[in-house]
Image (cartoon, grey):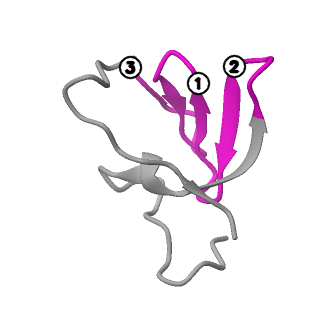
Amino acid sequence: MCQHQPRCPLASAPDHEAASLVAFHPEQGWGLLCNGVVVFDDTGALLPDGRSTPVHDMSAHRVPMRQAA
């Protein structure tokens, strides 16, 4: 799915939120990463296989989102 170099982390990787943002809808509170993960403005995420990740405290650990080139 990812065409970036270096490749973005897979959806199953612990740092999956570091993937490039390919669609962003701040008015709706979500964005789509190139690895298929949907991230929400409350820091939760929906993985491509339908599993969700819980909301987490981003003040302790910040993973920068890369913009698509």
Question: Which segment is the magenta one?
Answer: 25-54
Amino acid at circle 2: Gly
User: Which callout, 3 or 2, points at the residue further toward the start of the chain?
Assistant: 2
Amino acid at circle 1: Phe
Report the residue marked by disc 2: 29
Amino acid at circle 3: Pro
Query: Residue at (46%, 23%) from the top-left corner?
Result: 43
Task: Reply above or below: 52 against 6.
Answer: above
Query: Residue at (69%, 71%) from the top-left corner?
Result: 69
Q: Are marks 3 and 2 in contact (CB under 8 Å)?
A: no
Give the percent coordinates (x, y) of residue 53. 41, 27
Name the one closer to the observer, 34 or 20. Answer: 20
Q: Quadrant of residue 55?
A: top left
Between the residue at mark 3 and the residue at mark 2, the CA separation in whole angstroms equals 16 Å
Q: In front: mark 3 or mark 1?
A: 1
Q: Secondary structure at mark 1?
A: strand
Quarter of the image containing the N terminus? bottom right
Query: Residue at (19%, 26%) from the top-left corner?
Result: 60
Name the one closer to the observer, 13 or 24. Answer: 24
